[in-house]
Image (spheres, rainbow, N blue to C red):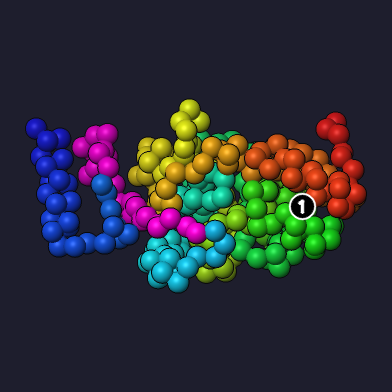
């Protein structure tokens, strides 16, 4: 009986919102919840992006994304966790310099503390602040932004509580205008890890990790992500001068190796 009353209440709210003309990009809870208790407790903001164009967002998209960006930045600055689309798969993010938020990511994922998180930044120059770079800047620009994670030596500017067991850090600049703008507006790196999504479906969308929503402040729904990106980013270790080592093949392996070997003459460092 309680479950039916709760579901009727949310049905009423949705219909009333439609009559009053609430924007589909504002706060929304329009999916069926798995239980009344989840519906009752869920305070997650589900914010939807219009379809992105290639390259930078259009002026119309920029206007539409203003609310989404502002809400997501506010949540991150408050130490909360968010789910975001990238150029590969959906990710869980928090401010990398916030130790408490980083611990919450590990708790949410049920992840061992010895498995590293990557960071996401908005610009090439940000990499030099948080990493020690031993390759040419042109190499960075040939691979980023893109579906590649570069593993470099970390600098002292990066939060010591983030992956304290290693001197290395993976860094990403996703080829996704929303993610780049989000990092720019935050003004500091985001700790980023993949969301727990199904690998059995033809596409990946925000509703596929709905079980995590009660622990997230904001879910940015950018729609389905195509099959070609579902392997995640290609992870390559560039911490040894003149060499590279593939840690995860990912979705951009051949293109990445072609740049590293063909253009810059780096040698593959075999796994010990």
Q: Position of residue 157 (x, y in %)?
A: 70, 64
Is-magenta flag for residue 268?
Answer: no
Dot 1 alpha-carbon crowd within 10 angstroms: few under 14, some 14 to 19, many 20 or more:
many
Quarter of the image containing the C terminus? top right
- The magenta span reads 31-53
Q: Position of residue 75 (x, y in %)?
A: 42, 60
Is-magenta flag for residue 35?
Answer: yes
| Residue 210, visible in the rendered structure | yes
The residue sitting at 50% across, 65% down in the picture is 57
Residue at the top extreme of this rendering: 200
| Residue 66, visible in the rendered structure | no
Rendered position, 203 above or below 83 = above
The residue sitting at 21% across, 37% down in the picture is 36
Residue 7 placement: quadrant: top left
Q: Position of residue 164 (x, y in %)?
A: 68, 48
| Residue picked out by circle 1 | 152
The residue sitting at 32% across, 59% down in the picture is 25
From the viewer's perspective, is 164 left or right of 201? right
Rendered position, 170 above or below 183 = above
The residue sitting at 54% across, 58% down in the picture is 54
């Amino acid at each position: 009986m309680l479950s039916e009353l709760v579901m009727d209440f949310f049905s009423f709210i949705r219909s009333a919102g439609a009559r009053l003309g609430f924007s589909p990009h504002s706060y929304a809870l329009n999916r069926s919840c798995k239980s009344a208790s989840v519906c009752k407790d869920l305070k997650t903001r589900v914010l939807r992006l219009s379809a992105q164009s290639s390259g930078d967002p259009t002026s119309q998209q920029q206007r539409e994304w203003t609310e989404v960006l502002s809400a997501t930045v506010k949540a991150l600055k408050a130490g909360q966790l968010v789910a975001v689309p990238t150029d590969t798969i959906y990710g869980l993010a928090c401010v990398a310099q916030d130790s408490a938020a980083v611990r919450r990511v590990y708790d949410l994922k049920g992840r061992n503390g010895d498995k590293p998180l990557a960071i996401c930044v908005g610009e090439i120059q940000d990499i030099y602040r948080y990493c020690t770079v031993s390759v040419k800047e042109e190499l960075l620009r040939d691979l980023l932004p893109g579906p590649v994670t570069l593993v470099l030596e970390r600098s002292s500017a990066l939060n010591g509580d983030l992956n304290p067991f290693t001197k290395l850090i993976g860094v990403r600049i996703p080829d996704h205008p929303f993610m780049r703008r989000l990092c720019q507006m935050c003004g500091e790196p985001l700790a980023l890890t993949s969301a727990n999504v199904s690998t059995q479906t033809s596409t990946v969308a925000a509703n596929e990790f709905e079980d995590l929503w009660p622990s997230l402040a904001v879910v940015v729904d950018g729609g389905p992500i195509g099959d070609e990106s579902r392997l995640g980013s290609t992870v390559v270790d560039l911490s040894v001068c003149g060499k590279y080592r593939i840690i995860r093949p990912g979705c951009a392996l051949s293109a990445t190796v072609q740049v590293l070997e063909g253009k810059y003459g780096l040698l593959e460092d075999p796994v010990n």
